[in-house]
Image (spheres, coloured by chain):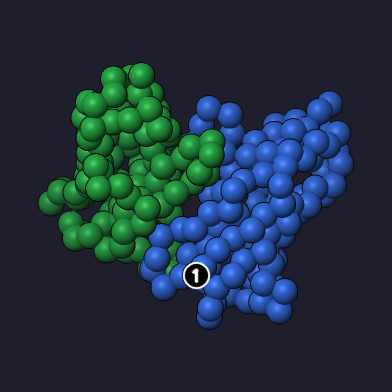
Chain colours: A blue, B green
């Protein structure tokens, strides 16, 4: 079945450091891929998405490229801020099915 | 603000009881999803409705049921509650549930079973 695997956390970084959170997926065909973010005490917010191979999603300085050849959708940011501290979820959906989420990666950024 | 409204935000109830969680989707969205988030299970898909009809079922227990009404709001009913049902329950909505549609989440309903 379809599944998403993302790197275990927590990820602890200093402000202005480079961030990568790895995400790989298993699915037949061409799923749509998403990154959602959950700030402390809040719901899930869509961060970015990509719907076809080689698409790059970007938002708020975060980027992720849909790589069909490696079945990956790694999240990157060049310079993280304390306000980026949150839990990040990689997810996929295919053929109108509900989102399937990874287990989430906690990011903690210190000043 | 995602436009998805969930009530109540917090709920504490006893084992064996029944509760109803309510969700109003974004204006114009026809598809509604329910998810459960717990520390041990992560984010689990429960059920999806599209324009009043059940479209997909995930890991929903038989003690749980849901429906989507003609005005498109949805309710998730949880009965014979157990301690392990304590979790954050999210409602989400999308335009028509097609692949590539953005799915927007509400802020969740925190359920504590004591």
User: Residue at the spot x=63%, y=76% of the render?
Assistant: A53
Residue at the farthest left position:
B70
Q: Is residue A80 above or below residue B10?
A: below
Callout 1: 10 Å neighbours few (<14), some, many (20+)? few
Asked whether B50 or B87 is in front, the reply is B87
The residue lying toward the viewer, choosing from B23 and A29, is A29
Where residue B18 appears, as percent x and y from the top left, is: 21, 29
What is the quadrant of residue B74 in the picture? top left
Asked whether residue A84 is in view, the answer is no
Q: Secondary structure at mark 1?
A: loop
Q: Is residue A5 left or right of A11 when viewed as pictured?
A: left
- The structure residue drawn at horizontal position 41% and vertical position 73%, both measured from the top left corner, is A95
Q: As rendered, which of A5 and A70 lies closer to the eye?
A: A5
User: In the picture shown, does residue B10 fall above or below B79?
Assistant: above
Position in image of residue A70 (x %, y %): 72, 74
Residue depicted at 25% across the width and 36% down the height = B78
Q: Chain of mark 1?
A: A
Residue B68, image x and y in percent? 19, 50
Q: Residue at x 28, y 31 (%)?
A: B81
Q: Is residue B48 shown left or right of residue A106?
A: left
Q: Which residue does the numbered mark 1 point to in the structure image? A: A1
| Screen quadrant of the C terminus of chain A | top right
Is any part of residue A104 visible from this angle? yes
Front residue of this view, candidates B42 and A53: B42
On the image, the x and y values in percent for residue B41 come to 50, 43
């Amino acid at each position: 079945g379809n599944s998403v695997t993302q790197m275990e956390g927590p990820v602890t970084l200093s402000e202005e450091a480079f961030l990568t959170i790895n995400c790989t997926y298993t699915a037949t065909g061409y799923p749509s891929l998403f990154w959602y973010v959950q700030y402390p005490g809040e719901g899930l917010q869509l961060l970015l998405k990509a719907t076809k191979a080689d698409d790059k999603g970007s938002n708020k300085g975060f980027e992720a490229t849909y790589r069909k050849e490696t079945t990956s959708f790694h999240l990157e940011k060049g310079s993280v801020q304390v306000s980026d501290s949150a839990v990040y979820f990689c997810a996929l959906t295919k053929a109108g099915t509900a989102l399937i989420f990874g287990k989430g990666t906690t990011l903690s950024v210190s000043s | 603000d995602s436009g998805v409204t969930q009530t109540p935000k917090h709920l504490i109830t006893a084992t064996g009881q029944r509760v109803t969680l309510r969700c109003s989707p974004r204006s114009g969205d026809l598809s509604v999803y329910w998810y459960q988030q717990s520390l041990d299970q992560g984010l689990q898909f429960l059920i999806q409705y599209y324009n009043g009809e059940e479209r997909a079922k995930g890991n929903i227990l038989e003690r749980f049921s849901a429906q989507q009404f003609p005005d498109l709001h949805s309710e998730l009913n949880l009965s014979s509650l157990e301690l392990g049902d304590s979790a954050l329950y999210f409602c989400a909505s999308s335009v028509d549930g097609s692949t590539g549609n953005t799915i927007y989440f509400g802020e969740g309903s925190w359920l504590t079973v004591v």
